Image: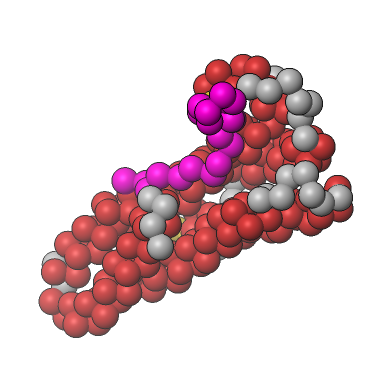
Amino acid sequence: MTDDPIPRPLIVLGEWFRQMDDESSRRMNEAPLQAGTIYDISLLIDDHLHRLVDHVNAFANVVNEGLGRLSDEPDEYFNGVARQLEAELDGILDCYDEVRGLTPGTDDFEGWSLLVEIHEETVYQIQRWLREVRDFVDDPVSVARKRSVSDGDDTVVNLALEMKPPRQVKQLTRWLEYRARANEHAWAQHQRRAHRNSMIAGTLLGLWLGKD
């Protein structure tokens, strides 16, 4: 690792990320407002997977495009990047609150629980990345030992956003298929939604696996 000081942009982002981590933890631990009963679990899953993918994709794009010039922009540029990341994380948390504020029926409980867990795991993975950047600003030596990679004669600290697909995505797809087969009357309608949900889940998996 070089003896260069921590780049000023990382110091700016570290303060933002500390606030984002604290606020997201507060919201995760806060009881949601009750939002009523679930009337169509497939439609709920369809809507929220769409929205979740949009927010995760936007968050990753801001990280990849907005943080590529750590030494070439003024503080205000990185304040703007942080605001964009904060907005996308808030969007994910809004979706999470909406889902967990709903009351599922007995038949819908498993699917609802899996959808809640997918949102939770998404937030947890983002929080872990925020903390790694923040911890690097606070104690670069310790983080370098865990996250450094060799680059010729130098050692480079890897602070890239790395996300893995939650196991609940596949579990939810299997649950939807099982649920629909148990209700022949709803099967034709479900097939159309299940196809869309499977495509969305595939997009989610591909994004977290780093594929296009």
Instruction: Out of 126 and 181, give the one closest to the viewer.
Output: 126
**Residue under the point 17% across and 62% down:** 178
Q: Position of residue 97 (x, y in %)?
A: 57, 55
Q: Position of residue 19 (x, y in %)?
A: 75, 40
**Residue under the point 73% across and 54% down:** 81
Q: Position of residue 82 (x, y in %)?
A: 74, 51
Q: What is the magenta range?
A: 149-167
Instruction: Out of 190 and 144, give the one closest to the viewer.
Output: 144
**Residue under the point 13% across and 76% down:** 184
- 84 left or right of 42? right
Q: How is the image coloured?
A: secondary structure
**Residue under the point 14% across and 67% down:** 182
Q: Main secondary structure of the magenta part?
A: loop
User: In the rendered structure, does residue 78 fall within the stretch colored magenta?
Assistant: no
Q: Position of residue 23 (x, y in %)?
A: 70, 42
Whether residue 34 appears in this view of the structure is no
Number of residue marks:
0
Judge whether 186 appears above or below 175 on screen: below
Point out the image quarter for the N terminus: top right
**Farthest-out residue, front:** 153
